[in-house]
């Protein structure tokens, strides 16, 4: 599948970060302390102040976001977010929790859920997250220089207007800097499974 790289300036910030600056082809983003996306479940709070650089996300489209996994603060996170509004969104990426980097996703429809899997072997590597929209479904995949791994298949309301882009959050500290290395768009995945 053919992906086309997007300039960082093609997106608009939802909740601008402390700083965001281009360094060569990369974008370095300093997250604001206390920033996060979460809605109610288990914790009882609502956070809608994470940083996301968003573009429109039409049907039959996929977006890839790549970043360097070099953070280790509790709940540090980066990846791709798909968003219609504060009550309907999906974030997927790598979050540092329980002492290890965890690849996972949070799907929010009024309230959030969270799925994770530890990926300690991904530390220090460039991670690519892929969100593929097709009809009423979003397929999320991830990789670190190897084959794609299915992270989540989630429902997506086709009646809503969706946006997508890189995101990062820093719920517990003020000095998280994420190096994003790619933002690209192309056709949606042809199928959920290869065979």
Image (cartoon, helix red, strand yellow):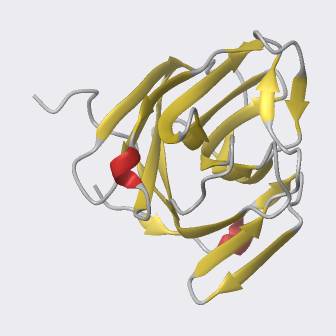
- In this orientation, does residue 162 appear? no
Instruction: Give 143 or 174, whichever is nearer the viewer.
Output: 174
**Residue 185 in sight from this viewpoint:** yes
Nearest the camera: 77 or 107?
Answer: 77
Spot occupied by residue 6 in the image (x, y as percentages of width and height): 56, 70
Query: Which quadrant of the figure has residue 108?
Result: top right
Horizontal and vertical percent position of residue 32: 87, 56
Q: Which residue is drawn at 68% across and 48% down?
A: 76
Taking the image as shown, residue 42 lies to the left or right of residue 115, namely: right
Q: Residue at x 59, y 41 (%)?
A: 95
Q: Nearer the viewer, residue 54 or 182?
A: 182
Location of the N terminus by quadrant is bottom left
Residue sitting at the far bottom:
24
Indicate left or right for 51 with 4 as reference: right
Q: Can you say whether 120 is above or below 109 in the image?
A: below
Residue sticking out furthest to the left: 195
Number of dots carrying numbers? 0
Q: Is residue 52 left or right of residue 115?
A: right
Report the residue that reaches farthest toward the front. Answer: 99
> Which of these two is toward me, 19 or 89?
19
Q: In this view, does 192 lie above or below 75?
A: above
- The C terminus lies in quadrant: top left
Q: In the image, what residue occupies the spot 56% across and 84% down?
A: 25
Residue 116 x %, y %: 49, 27
Image coordinates for residue 144, horizontal then vertical, percent: 34, 55
Residue 32 lies, with reference to residue 118, above or below; the image says below
Report which quarter residue 81 is drawn in.
top right
Q: In this view, does 162 lie to the left or right of 102?
A: right
């Amino acid at each position: 599948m053919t992906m086309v790289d997007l300039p960082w300036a093609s997106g608009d910030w939802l909740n601008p970060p402390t700083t965001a600056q281009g360094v060569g082809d990369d974008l370095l983003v300093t997250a604001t302390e206390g920033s996060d996306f979460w809605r109610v479940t288990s914790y009882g709070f609502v956070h809608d102040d994470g940083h996301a650089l968003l573009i429109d996300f039409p049907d039959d489209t996929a977006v890839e976001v790549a970043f360097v996994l070099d953070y280790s603060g509790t709940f540090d996170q980066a990846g791709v977010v798909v968003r219609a509004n504060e009550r309907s969104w999906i974030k997927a990426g790598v979050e540092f929790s329980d002492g290890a980097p965890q690849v996972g996703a949070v799907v929010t429809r009024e309230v959030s859920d969270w799925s994770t899997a530890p990926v300690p072997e991904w530390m220090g590597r460039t991670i690519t997250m892929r969100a593929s929209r097709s009809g009423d479904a979003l397929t999320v995949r991830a990789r670190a220089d190897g084959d794609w791994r299915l992270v989540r298949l989630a429902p997506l309301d086709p009646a809503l207007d969706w946006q997508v882009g890189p995101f990062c959050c820093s719920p517990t500290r003020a000095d998280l800097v994420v190096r994003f290395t790619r933002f690209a768009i192309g056709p949606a995945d042809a199928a959920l499974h290869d065979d």
